[in-house]
Amino acid sequence: MSHTDRIAKITKAYVRHYSDNGQTTAYVEWLDESGHPGRTEGEADYAWGPISSHMHALFKRAEREGLTIAWQKW
């Protein structure tokens, strides 16, 4: 995503816990204004979701756009 393109549409949002190393990460997949896909990720807590305010805001936007947040264990 270039510095002038913005997220036009969030396509998927999920929290994934990796059982092999205990890491939990929040992911948001999206399309920018040019139609190019991208993904933003950040540290998360499996019980509560994203930790950073930026990721939390992206999750709230995903919910406003009608997406259900997925919780995955790998």
Image (cartoon, grey):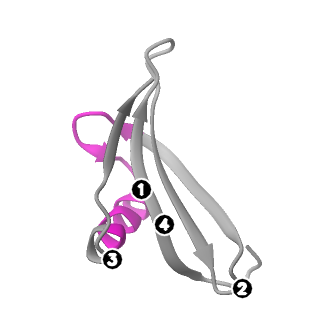
The crowd level at tag 3 (other Cα within 10 Å; few <14, some 14-19, many 20+) is few
Instruction: Answer above or below: position of 33 versus 42.
Output: below
> Looking at numbered disc 4 in the image, what kind of residue is underneath it?
Thr
The crowd level at tag 2 (other Cα within 10 Å; few <14, some 14-19, many 20+) is few
The residue nearer to you, when weighing 48 against 36, is 36
Residue denoted by label 3: 65
Q: Residue at x 64, y 86 (%)?
A: 33
- Assign the N terminus to one quadrant of the image: bottom right
Q: Earlier in the sequence, mark 4 or mark 3?
A: 4
Asked whether residue 53 is drawn in magenta, I would say yes
The crowd level at tag 1 (other Cα within 10 Å; few <14, some 14-19, many 20+) is many
Q: Secondary structure at mark 2?
A: loop
Q: Secondary structure at mark 3?
A: loop
Q: Which mark is residue 13?
A: 1
Give me the C-alpha separation between circle 4 and circle 2: 15 Å
Residue denoted by label 4: 11
Q: Quadrant of the rendered structure where residue 45 is?
A: top left
Residue segment shown in magenta: 44-62
Point out residue 15 in the picture as x, y percentages from the top left corner: 39, 42
Point out residue 22 in the picture as x, y percentages from the top left corner: 43, 18
Residue denoted by label 2: 34
Point out residue 35 in the picture as x, y percentages from the top left corner: 68, 80
The residue nearer to you, when weighing 2 against 38, is 38
The residue nearer to you, when weighing 51 against 39, is 39
- Assign the C terminus to one quadrant of the image: top left
Tell whether 39 sits left or right of 49: right
Q: Residue at x 50, y 78 (%)?
A: 9
Q: Residue at x 40, y 48 (%)?
A: 14
Give me the C-alpha separation between circle 1 and circle 4: 7 Å
